[in-house]
Amino acid sequence: MKKNKYDRLFTFKKLKKNKLEINLSTLNSEKKKIEDINNNLKKIMQSSDFSEGELISSSSLKQASNFRINLQEKIDISSNRKQHLKNEIKSYLLEINKIKKQQEKILKKRNTELLIKEQNNESKQQEDFRNKTKQN
């Protein structure tokens, strides 16, 4: 069967939508990993708190302070990455919805075109029938 332009366009949009959905799935799994990492880093940060009344040498205080600064930087980086992923996921969802609307329009136009073709064929058949009856 010969495919018309609407069928090809619909297939193209379907492929594009599938690609976006695959990428969206990847982004969601990455976001989940980042959230887990962020939670683990926060737990480590809480566990590295100093106890009240505990005597600490200056070198261990400096070492713990550097460790906590490093942890805080990693927490900030993971939070920024998480926010970036949220924005990217949102843009993918918007794009997928846009493609769905385009697919609906394509189907509507294709159906309209098919209906017009059918009407033209019917009118042509009626005209042919009239011509045949006139000849007889």
Image (cartoon, rainbow, N blue to C red):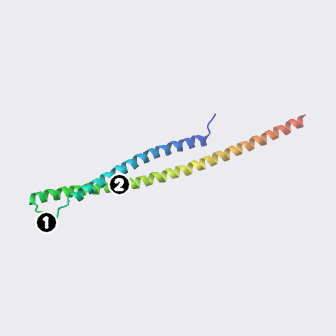
Front position in the image: 45 or 24: 45
Q: Which residue is mark 1?
A: 53
* Tag 1: amino acid: Gly
Classify mark 1: helix, strand or loop: loop
Classify mark 2: helix, strand or loop: helix
**Residue depicted at x 55% and y 41%:** 11
Percent of width and height locating residue 100: 54, 50
Task: Please state if 79 lies on the left or on the right of 97 as rendered.
Answer: left
Quote the CA–CA distance across marks 2 and 1. 37 Å
Mark closest to the chain's N terminus, 2 or 1? 1
* Tag 2: amino acid: Lys
**Residue depicted at x 35% and y 54%:** 82
- The vertical placement of 79 against 20, above or below, is below
In the picture, which quadrant includes the N terminus?
top right
* Crowd band around label 2 with a 10 angstrom C-alpha radius: few (<14), some (14–19), many (20+): some
Front position in the image: 105 or 132: 105
Front position in the image: 100 or 114: 100
**Residue depicted at x 51% and y 52%:** 97
Front position in the image: 100 or 57: 57
Pointer 2 with pointer 1, Cβ within 8 A? no
Percent of width and height locating residue 24: 43, 48
Which dot marks residue 82?
2
* Crowd band around label 1 with a 10 angstrom C-alpha radius: few (<14), some (14–19), many (20+): few
Task: Please state if 118 lies on the left or on the right of 73 as rendered.
Answer: right
Percent of width and height locating residue 61: 13, 60
